[in-house]
Image (spheres, rainbow, N blue to C red):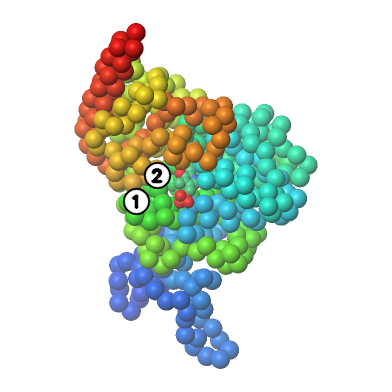
Amino acid sequence: MTQQLDTLLVTGSTLHDYEKKTGAVNIPIYASSTFDQSSFDSFGPFDYSRSGNPTRDALEKTIARLENGHRGFAFSSGIAAITATLLTLNAGDHLVITNEVYGGTYRFVTTLLPKYGISHSFADFTDLAAVEAAIQPNTVVLYAETPANPLLGITDIRGVVALAQKYHLKTFVDNTFMTPLYQQPLALGVDVVLHSATKFLGGHSEVIAGLAITKDEEMSKAIYAIQNGMGAILSPHDSFSVIQGIKTLRARLDFSSRNAQKIAEFLHAHEDVVDVYYPGLPCHIGYAIHQSQSTSAGAVLSFTLPTKQFTQLVVEHMTIPIFAVSLGGVESILSYPPTMSHAAIPLAERQARGITDGLLRLSVGLENVDDLIADLSQALAIAATTTANMNTTAQ
Ligand SMILES: *Cc1c(COP(=O)(O)O)cnc(C)c1O
């Protein structure tokens, strides 16, 4: 019997064989670096925990089932999953990568990949013609993030896959904002799906973790070689945390996403808000494409305010969200991409990409939505009055 995704979130990690003896409902944390071998010439399923660990294995099998992939791999961070996947490329290879990309991915691709002889071009992935124009004879991968960070730009996954097929390339997609619950890139023909499990999958701001899920055996072999050969594995304790987070994903993410939609609509109607970026608003560029490839707009939105000063006042007067990097926690998280998640991108580049001085990103948590809207409303009112008074005094 095939199970719906909701059910798999819960059963995905309980269908393991490890704990038949005790019937423990949760996978144990196998805090063991090494494993006693049954005899001189026959070995058990595990030998050394860098190469494989039962708790990590449960998480890897769970995420592979959820993404409907060939194999899952758990890493010590999202960036470790992303770098391991990109290091499957060889010296001389080239990749085309979205210019709206997570700051840490930008840093890796621009400062470290060149040391391995792997070159890149950035392209606007909301424009398939621009992606095609950036393909070179030595291009091997198209790398997308959708919805992207921090302006929630939408990439047409089917369109990118069609381009990749035309030029015999692979496609890697960072699916952090959607999770397998809302978007299934492998089903659309993507080769590797990537997650920062630090975010919604973990869900409680307690663990840094990353996942890579492959479509076929060839990619699985290549990524396993890097995971085992470079060693950025997820610990058994952290693997356990992510498994526990995944079980409540449906309840958390649906609740947060519904509230994000209401907050986006509130901000969109607010006179002091310049722009709102949220794929659940019909005015969002790429809205129709997002609808065609995802089942929800998710829990992250961004918006721009008139000035840096205005933005600072809003941040200082909000009382409910924490002001921090990261997203996807049970607590709402407000962040300022120019100096936080996207600080690695040089100023001129940032501005060219629309990451302006008035930009805020909000990851909606599990608080009451009316409280969040009231909090935003009072902070926006204080910012409006204060900046108006400052301008009057200055004249
Ligand atoms: C946070 C994040 C990453 C990096 O993950 P870490 O777990 O912080 O290493 C990559 N991609 C996206 C979209 C992210 O939000």
Q: Nearer the viewer, residue 290 or 309?
A: 309
Crowding at mark 2 (Cα within 10 Å: few <14, some 14-19, many 20+) = some
Residue at image mark 2: 326
Residue sitting farthest toward the right: 137
Residue drawn at 39 percent across, 43 percent down:
325
Residue sitting farthest toward the front: 394
Is 350 placed above or below 385 here? Answer: below
Residue 205, numbered label = 1
Question: Label 2, label 1: how many angstroms apart (C-alpha)?
Answer: 8 Å
**Residue type, mark 2 in image:** Ser
Residue drawn at 37 percent across, 44 percent down:
328
Q: Secondary structure at mark 1?
A: loop
Q: Residue 40: where, in percent of width, then height?
A: 56, 91
**Left or right: 59 as drawn, with respect to 119:** left
Residue drawn at 34 percent across, 17 percent down:
272
Within 8 Å of ligand 1, the CB of disc 2? yes
